[in-house]
Image (tube, helix red, strand yellow):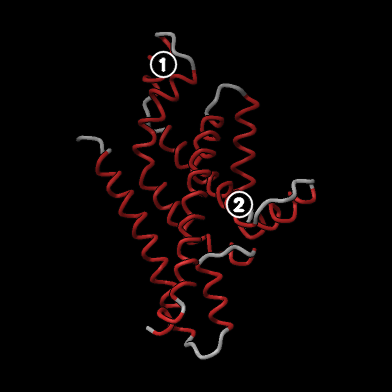
Amino acid sequence: MNVLSDNFAMFREGFIGTVELTVLSALLALVLGTLVAAFRVSPVPALRVFGTTWVTLLRNTPLVLLFLAVTLGLPALGLKGWDSFWLAVLALGCYTSAFICEALRSGINTVPVGQAEAARSIGMTFGQTLAQIVLPQAARTSIPPIGSLLIALAKNTAIASGFNVTELGSVQKTLNAASGYNIYVIFLWIAICYIIITFTISGLFRLLENRLAVAR
C-alpha cells in the first residue's frame, strides 16, 4: 500500500490524464469514424475512395508509427505549437476512427436495402436517409464492437507515455526509475487503475446495449 499512499498525487494525476485522453480521443474517433463510414457508403466515388484510403492506411499503420508521424510530421509541415497531449489525442482518435468506421459500416450492412429504397422513393436525399433511417439502426447493432474498440483505446493510451504525456504509463515509468519500490507492486496498482477505466467503459456500453436492444 505504501507505493500508492506515498505517490497518491502522482497516481491521481496519471489516472486523470488517462481518463481525459481516453474520453477526448473517443469523441474524436466517434465523429471521424461516423463521417468516414458515411463516405464509404456514399454514392460519390471520390468520397468512397477517400474513406477506403483512410481506413486502409490507418488500420495497417502501427500506432507508434502514427504517433511519430503526428509528433514529428506536423511541426515539419509548419504546424508548430501543439501540446503533446493534443497530439496524442489526434493520433489516438484518428487511429481508432478507422476501426469505428468499419464497425459502423458492418452495422449499416445489416439494415435492409428496402428501407433506403423506400426513403429515396419518398424524396429523401442520401444524407437524410443515412442520418434518419440507416445510421440509427446501424448504431444499435454496432454498440458491442464499438465498446470493445473504446476499451482497446483506453489501453492504447499507454503509448502516449513515450511522447511526454502525463498518464498512467508515465507514472509506471517514473516509479520504476525510483529506488525502493517493488516493480510488481507498481504494475499491480497501474493494472488496477486500467481495470477501473475499462470496467467503467464496459459497464456503460452494456447499459447502453440493454437500453437500445431490439425487441424480439
Residue, disc 2 = 86
Describe the element under mark 1 as helix, strand or loop: helix
Left or right relative to 90: residue 142: left
Relative to 214, say whether 59 is above or below.
below
Task: Give the left or right position of residue 46, taking residue 102 as reference.
Answer: right
The kind of residue on which mark 1 rests is Glu
* Residue at image location 39% in from the left, 60% down from the top: 198
Residue 109's x, y, as percent? Answer: 42, 32
In the image: residue 213, left or right of residue 43: left
How far is mark 2 from mark 1, CA to CA? 42 Å
Q: Position of residue 116 (x, y in %)?
A: 41, 20
**Residue at 52%, 49% in the rendered image:** 25
Q: Please give the residue where the numbered disc 1 appears in the rendered image.
A: 117
Residue 55 vertical placement versus 172 (above, below): above
Q: Quadrant of residue 47?
A: top right
Q: Which class describes the residues within 10 Å of circle 1: few (<14), some (14-19), or many (20+)?
A: few
Count every numbered label the image shows and give the total.
Answer: 2
Q: Is residue 89 above or below residue 108?
A: below
Q: Which numbered disc flags the more N-terminal residue, 2 or 1?
A: 2
Residue 18: percent from left, percent from top: 49, 61
Extreme top residue here? 122
